[in-house]
Every structure is written in C-alpha cells, then in structure tokens.
Image (cartoon, grey):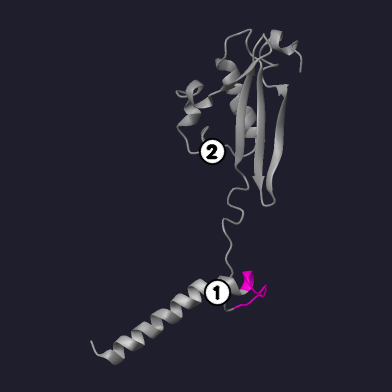
Amino acid sequence: MSPRLLGVRLTVFLALAAFICLGPAYRQVLGRRSDVLRHWTMFHGFGSQICDVRYLRHRADGASEAVDRFALLADAPATNDASGIRTIRGVERAEEIGTQLCERLPAGERDLRLIARCGSKQGWKPASDGSRNLCASLDPIAAGAPQ
C-alpha cells in the first residue's frame, strides 16, 4: 500500500472517529443543538415501564419477612411467558402476582404487602407503600388484620 493511500485512509478514519466521538460533546459541553451532529441520550425512556417490586409477609408476631416470588411461583404458568414474573411492568401486574402469591401462602398466614416503585422518564416513582394487605380478599382472618 502506498504511503499516500495510507495517509488518505488514516485521515478519513480519524475524521469519522472525531465525528462519532465528538458529535455528542457539541450539545453536552457547548449546550448547542445541531441537525448535523447527533446528540447522545442514554436509555431514553427504556426503563419507564419497569417496576422494582418487593413482597413482604407480615407474621403474627409483628415481624415481616421478604417473600421470594420466584421460589413460590416457579411452577406457575405465568413464569413461562415473556411477561412472567421476572419483568413487572406496572403496579397492576405487581398486584396480580401478589394475588398469585397469596394463593400459595398457608391459610391464616396470608398478610402480604407490596412495596413497589416504577420507573419514569423523571426517575423512580413510588407506586405502592405496603400499607394494603393483598390477601385480604382471600382470607377472612387476614381481612381483620391491622392495615
């Protein structure tokens, strides 16, 4: 390869690398917009429907313990589809899974609380504070338990 051709290829490569790497800096560092240089956005709106969910079971002695939804629902049909119990999108889905968990808990020990926060473009938003017993409709004893 001739030195001249090598120089042309190196120049083109460096120009493209600068365009790719420095393009986002134009907006982020200088605060300007351009139709030619693209801006860089990391995960814009990607996690806006995902919820971070914890289930807590309140015991008769007042203590609470975390409930592993994967262990209790390992053989449930809902775990086989894409929406399953792994990725929870929305507090309504989290409550549906909570109802399935309630059905698997022993009668008389059904006091399950949901603590959830869901992602939005502005950050995490509280969705459920754990004040309501998800099993109240299934267990008459739990319905009388303190909320």
Seen at 30% across and 89% down, the residue is 5
Seen at 53% across and 25% down, the residue is 69
Numbered mark located on residue 59 in the image: none
Magenta region: 27-35
Instruction: Give the answer, above or below, for where 90 lies relative to 36.
Output: above
Per the picture, the main secondary structure of the magenta-coloured stretch is loop
Instruction: Give the answer, above or below, for where 95 lies relative to 82.
Output: above
SS at mark 2 in the image:
loop
Residue 49: x and y, percent? 62, 45
- Kindly indicate the quadrant of the structure image that contains residue 92: top right
Placement of the C terminus among the 4 image quadrants:
top right
| 31 in magenta | yes
Determine the residue located farthest toward the bottom in the rendered image: 4
| 113 in magenta | no
Instruction: Give the answer, above or below, for where 63 lies relative to 81.
Output: above
Q: Earlier in the sequence, mark 2 or mark 1?
A: 1
Which residue is labeled 2 in the image? 87
Residue 72: x and y, percent? 50, 21
Seen at 57% across and 37% down, the residue is 88
Residue 66: x and y, percent? 58, 22
User: As shown in the figure, which amino acid type bears the numbered disc 1?
Assistant: Gly
Determine the residue located farthest toward the left in the rendered image: 1
Along the line of sight, the residue nearer the viewer: 53 or 3: 3
Q: Is residue 76 left or right of residue 43?
A: left
| Number of numbered discs visible in the structure rendering | 2
Which residue is labeled 1 in the image? 23
User: As shown in the figure, which amino acid type bears the numbered disc 2?
Assistant: Thr
